[in-house]
Amino acid sequence: MTELTGSPELILGIETSCDETAAAVVADGTTVLSSVVHSQVQLHERWRGVVPEVASRSHTQRILPIVQQALADAGIAASALTAIAVTHRPGMVGCLLVGLAAGKALALLHDLPLLGVDHVQAHVHTALLAEPGLQLPALALVASGGHTALWLLKAPLDTDRLGTTRDDAAGEALDKGAALLGLPYPGGPSIQRAARGGNARAIDLPRSLLGPDSLDFSFSGLKTALLYHLRGPGANLPARALAGDELRDLAASYQEAVVDVLIQKLRRAAERVAVRSLCIGGGVARNERLRERLQQDRVLAGLHLVLPEPALCSDNGAMIALMGHLQLAAGRTSPLDIDAVATPQSAGKAKVRP
Ligand code: KG4
Ligand code: ZN
């Protein structure tokens, strides 16, 4: 338990938008007193993706014990909280409703302000939790199973989206690529493991940059290129079982193609918008090759790089509590009848010079 002095602001963050049931207590928007995350990966493994009804049932079973655990780990009672922050968008509505119901009940019971949080914005702002004095504006890459976008973080709660994926998210491309390679779900970590020791230049796979000016992403062609590499164009043969160097080289080449596109788009964005820092968030931001490439990149070297610890990159309650802290400071509390919404907050699109 962390020793608290004075009377800090204590925010409980609740996250149930996808397949993690998570709760955390954050003090003064800077200190994570507790963070409990239950991943449903094993439940969804055999379908190679998240099944919404299975996910929301599991959230229902877990949410109260996880909130209690987060409070116990922080060493506080619910009555000591300052406010409740909860993800209310975007995500699977049945999943969001579980966290929202818990958050609303706690807010009502303890007469606390409720703060409805946008999950994607929480990923964009995570660097402020990793480094509270972060120099802004910052360029933020959010890459997960459901989203891949570049954001300009001008000031807390003031962001513009610079570009987004036109088809698959980076994590989705890794998950589907892993399925083609016969590797387990989720694909990002299993491709990372399989790629260790492999030659990332062994197989020439495409990097779709969508023309010289675009800050958008496209990963569907890469996935198809892998399929054709394994089965031949248009052929409908079952994929061969891969092993040894062949698997290592293919996994490394596929991972490198995804990472290359992310790096090239970051370089492009950094050339066009004046930023002081560069940060990453979302499950794909856990990737060791992406982190290594970012640390070595000469073009991006002029920017202050923030690589939040892996547990803060994938879905967690602490980033939701951080957003709650920022929203509370800005007086943006939510009514108790706030709804669950499947889509993200409509994104301000920045005008950037090509
Ligand atoms: O942010 P997240 O936990 O959940 C959402 O999708 O919102 O991200 C999950 C995604 C999955 O596609 C998974 O394959 C990917 O993040 N991922 C990784 C790694 N760990 C998780 N991708 C690459 N390398 C990793 N180490
Ligand atoms: Zn996420």
Image (spheres, grey):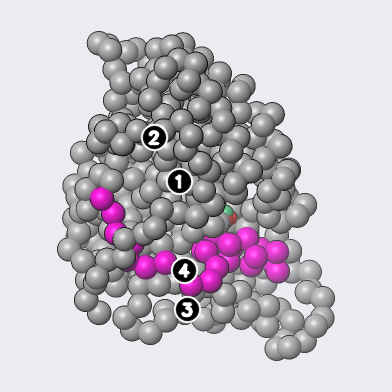
Residue 207, labelled with which disc? 3
Helix, strand, or loop for circle 1? helix
Residue 165, labelled with which disc? 4
Residue at the disc numbered 1: 119
Q: Quadrant of residue 231?
A: bottom right
Mark 2: give few (<14), some (14-19) or many (20+) Cα within 10 Å: some
Q: Is mark 1 within 8 Å of ligand 2?
A: yes
Q: Is residue 320 above or below residue 255?
A: above
Q: Nearer the viewer, mark 2 or mark 1?
A: 2
Mark 2–mark 3 Cα distance, whole angstroms, equals: 42 Å
Which residue type carries mark 2? Ser
The range drawn in magenta is 158-181
Residue at the disc numbered 2: 334
Mark 4: give few (<14), some (14-19) or many (20+) Cα within 10 Å: some
Which residue type carries mark 3? Arg
Q: Nearer the viewer, mark 3 or mark 4?
A: 4
Question: Is the Cβ of the residue at disc 3 closer than 8 Å to that at disc 4?
Answer: no
Q: Nearer the viewer, mark 4 or mark 2?
A: 2
Helix, strand, or loop for circle 2? loop
